Amino acid sequence: MGKIIAFVNQKGGVGKTTSSINLAASLGLLGKKTLLIDLDPQGNATTGVGVDKGTSKATTYELLTDKANVQDVVIKTHFKNLYMMPASINLAGVGNELRDLSRENSKFIPALQLKKHLRKLVDVFDYVIIDCPPSLEIITTNALAAADSVIIPVQCEFFALEGIMQLLSSIKLAQRKLNPELDIEGVLLTMLDSRANLGLEVVEDIRSYFKDKVYDTIIPRLVRLAEAPSHGKPIHAYDPRSRGTEAYLNLAKEVIERNGK
């Protein structure tokens, strides 16, 4: 049975999409059949693996609104063992549409739409990685309801813990109301500038707070990592010798080891 992991942080600019793309691609490179789900209306994870949003017949918007099934939405990327559910800008208004559908049908539960569809995929993929938007609204709630666990990316900069308590409260609420099995998979430190003392201090603060939930792997701040998505490639395909390639492969190995598969 596959593991569903959502990348969640309502704070933007913490490396969430970059990490979703590169963890998924690295898991594929290590032989794990992996599905990357883009739930962000901006669709950066979609273009980041070379998928043209304009040519997608069905996206996660159609999935959430029951206009398509999973077979319509899942596509194969050019990268080893990596599949994709693309996003579209239509996701930006999906909350209103889901509320309208729930008023029309009392059995329609907006927060459980993704979970309903992903049930059909649990035996197909080893890992499902969900890239969430930088908010804690209905789309992210769908991810929390569907996921087995969450990875929280935290930027190694001042105010790193800002908003984390709100996020943890949202995770606990999802556990109580929607998904009692939801767990914190891990905390990922991102964008570390090892030349700055502040970044190293933040690392210590995060490790002190989250203890063994923090991954040993730390993602460095690198120009090549920032460039790769604009070329439609994960870092291992864009620059195989990059420190970013090594970091995300190490992260993938940690994820596999923690899950015992």
Image: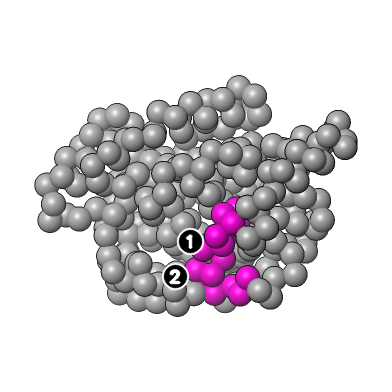
- Give the residue type at disc 2: Pro
- Give the residue type at disc 1: Ile
Whichever of callouts 2 and 1 sits on the residue coming sooner in the sequence is 1
Which is nearer the eye, 41 or 179? 41
Q: Quadrant for residue 91, please give it.
A: bottom right
Q: Residue furthest top?
A: 176
Image position, residue 49 (x, y; %) = 52, 70
Stretch of the chain drawn in magenta:
31-53
In the rendered view, tell whether residue 110 sits above or below residue 57: above
Say which residue appears at 50% left-offset and 68% top-offset: 48
Q: Are marks 2 and 1 in contact (CB under 8 Å)?
A: yes
| In this rendering, position of residue 194 left or right of residue 122 | left
Which is nearer the eye, 246 or 92? 92
Q: In what element is the residue under mark 2?
A: helix
Q: Say if the magenta span includes residue 33.
A: yes
In the rendered view, tell whether residue 227 sits above or below residue 127: below
Say which residue appears at 43% left-offset and 52% top-offset: 16
Image position, residue 170 (x, y; %) = 52, 30
Q: Say if the magenta span includes residue 14.
A: no
Image position, residue 127 (x, y; %) = 57, 53
Q: In what element is the residue under mark 1?
A: helix
**Which residue is identified by label 2?**
229
The answer, for residue 221, to whether it is visible in the render is yes
